[in-house]
Image: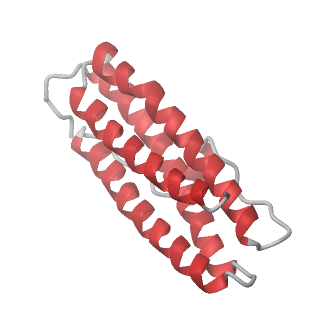
Amino acid sequence: MEAFIGIKNENIIQITDSLSKLLADEFVLYTKTRNAHWNIEGNDFYNKHLFFEAQYNQLDEIMDSVAERIRTLGHYAPATLKSFLELTHLTEASRSHNDSLGFIKELLEDHESIIIFLRENIEHFASELKDYGTSDFITGLMETHEKMAWMLRSHLK
């Protein structure tokens, strides 16, 4: 059902296409964080196991909010593994060791990639597509990812 909320339909299509890509990125990052939680090894196992759990729980909430934003705008959220892999900017994990340093570096790169994607779209959504709500929404997501990235980065010192 089309939403009549003061945003041109062609703009909503562009916005929901971008949000679908974001949702795919969030899902891939969530899966990679789950992988780190499940498969971490080493003398810091327990602490990192709990740390990765906290991160994937945050990502679960983010995924839900992105999908709900897409639905709020009158479109359907992608919800298959195939569609996520077609839409994502991220790559699947390809690791040979399950050490915390490797997981953290890889997850940090993905958070930073999402932060850049969000930052590039804040002004675009507001000024060009006239969707201040989604612009505000992704600003909040960017701040959340920045904090999650900081937490990961802090482990690298």
In the depicted view, which residue is nearer to us: 98 or 47? 47
Residue 65 picture location, percent across and down: 31, 53
Q: Visible in this render: residue 63?
A: yes
Q: Residue at x 62, y 41 (%)?
A: 89
Above or below for 48 versus 64: below
Look at the image and tell me in which quarter the N terminus lies.
top left
In this view, 124 is above or below 43: above
Q: Residue at x 28, y 45 (%)?
A: 69
**In the current view of this chain or complex, which residue is farthest to the front?**
157
* Residue 127, above or below 32: above
Front residue of 23/2: it is 23
Rendered position, 17 above or below 32: above
Q: Furthest residue to the right?
A: 96
Residue 19, image x, y percentages: 41, 39
Q: How is the image coloured?
A: secondary structure
Q: Is residue 10 left or right of residue 142?
A: left
Q: Quadrant of the C terminus?
A: bottom right
Q: Is residue 87 visible?
A: no
Where residue 3 sits: x, y (%)? 18, 34
